[in-house]
Image (spheres, rainbow, N blue to C red):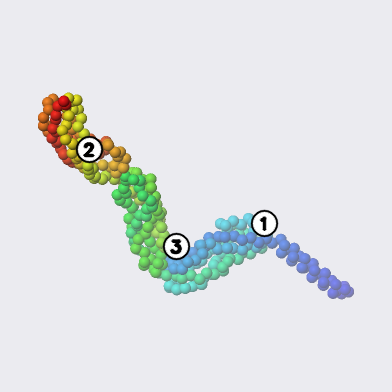
């Protein structure tokens, strides 16, 4: 029985090594990234940055390793037992569910295994909301005002981060194609990743857009006499005049030369001599005449020889 025992021991060791090697080669390795869940007390919040996701190393039998999905594993940083401000190093806990909780050879490690985090007293503050815009409304229009609802929001976060925040801006609203009033739901911009909005990060913005109206004086403006009988002519040169109007800027920019004048109707003249006739402004549609000069014009009418 004990003959050749060294050879027998050697054979047993080789067989054991082969068995272990076989088991090792059956194991698979896989990496998975999962969100980090932070559990907090009612009074303290993180005041330093921390990773939002952690990397997990899974090692075990192939069938089990590749059946695991992200929802089967949860990385947890439990801070509920801390009651004072300070800097702490806290281990990351792993919670298994589904396929990850089944019996087997599954090994799971997290990178990193612990995190250093600063905790501060949680502060809450009401701040003003300010609308941010980009671009300009088209020519001839103006953004008269913006109305935000709500006009203020409550923010919460670590005391030191909250203290310096006085207002919150919205994401940019593009004005380049706005020709009428508009209403949009827009997101608030977080000034700090550690600050959150208590009532949600969406507000309603109403913009009041109006056509721009301008007052403009045109001078000199030609005076045109029409309807004069061919038997007569006018002595001397006609003066020029002036017209003051109220008009939409877009119509003003489209005004062509010669579209505005002062007109005198001389069709009622039947004899030569001096006559005073009323002057009437001639303007394009959309132009409101506020005043004009002259309102009447004296004409010296002579008979053609």
The residue that label 1 is drawn on is 63
In the picture, measured across the screen, residue 74 lies left or right of residue 83, that is: right
In the picture, measured across the screen, residue 176 lies left or right of residue 258, that is: right
Secondary element at image label 1: helix
- Which numbered disc, 3 or 2, marks the residue closer to the eye? 2
The numbered dot on residue 89 is none
Give the mark, 1 or 2, whose residue is nearer the N terminus: 1
> CB of mark 3 within 8 Å of CB of mark 2?
no
Q: Estimate the x, y position of residue 220 in percent, counting from the top left.
A: 22, 42
Q: Quadrant of residue 305?
A: top left
The residue that label 3 is drawn on is 193
Measured in 3D between alpha carbons, the distance from the residue under mark 3 to the one under mark 2, in whole angstroms, is 67 Å
Give the mark, 3 or 1, whose residue is nearer the N terminus: 1
Measured in 3D between alpha carbons, the distance from the residue under mark 1 to the one under mark 2, in whole angstroms, is 95 Å
Let me know if residue 123 appears in the view: no
**Quadrant holding the N terminus:** bottom right
Q: Residue at x 63, y 62 (%)?
A: 58
Give the mark, 3 or 2, whose residue is nearer the N terminus: 3
In the picture, measured across the screen, residue 207 lies left or right of residue 301, that is: right
The numbered dot on residue 222 is 2
Residue nearer the viewer, 202 or 276? 276
Q: Estimate the x, y position of residue 57 in percent, counting from the top left.
A: 61, 63
Measured in 3D between alpha carbons, the distance from the residue under mark 3 to the one under mark 1, in whole angstroms, is 39 Å
Q: Estimate the x, y position of residue 71 in percent, counting from the top left.
A: 56, 57
Q: Residue at x 14, y 36 (%)?
A: 296
């Amino acid at each position: 029985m004990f003959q050749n025992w060294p050879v027998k021991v050697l054979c047993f060791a080789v067989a054991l090594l082969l068995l272990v090697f076989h088991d090792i080669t059956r194991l698979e390795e896989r990496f998975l990234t999962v969100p980090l869940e932070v559990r907090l007390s009612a009074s303290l919040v993180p005041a330093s940055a921390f990773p939002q996701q952690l990397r997990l190393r899974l090692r075990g039998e192939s069938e089990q390793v590749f059946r695991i999905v992200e929802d089967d594993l949860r990385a947890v940083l439990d801070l509920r037992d801390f009651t004072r401000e300070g800097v702490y190093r806290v281990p990351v806990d792993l919670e298994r569910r589904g396929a990850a909780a089944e019996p087997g050879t599954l090994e799971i490690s997290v990178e990193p295994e612990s995190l250093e985090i600063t905790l501060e007293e949680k502060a809450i503050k009401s701040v003003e909301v300010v609308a941010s815009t980009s671009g300009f409304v088209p020519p001839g229009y103006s953004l008269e005002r913006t109305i935000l609802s709500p006009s203020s929001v409550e923010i919460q976060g670590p005391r030191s981060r909250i203290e310096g925040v006085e207002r919150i801006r919205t994401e940019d609203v593009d004005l380049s194609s706005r020709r009428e009033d508009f209403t949009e739901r827009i997101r608030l911009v977080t000034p700090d990743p550690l600050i959150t909005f208590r009532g949600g990060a969406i507000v309603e913005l109403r913009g009041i857009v109006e056509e721009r109206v301008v007052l403009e004086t045109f001078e000199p403006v030609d005076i045109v006499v029409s309807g004069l009988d061919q038997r007569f002519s006018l002595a001397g040169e006609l003066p020029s005049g002036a017209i003051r109007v109220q008009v939409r800027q877009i119509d003003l920019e489209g005004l062509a030369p010669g579209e505005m004048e002062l007109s005198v109707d001389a069709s009622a003249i039947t004899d030569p001599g001096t006559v005073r006739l009323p002057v009437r402004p001639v303007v394009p549609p959309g132009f409101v005449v506020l005043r004009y000069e002259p309102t009447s014009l004296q004409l010296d009418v002579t008979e053609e020889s």
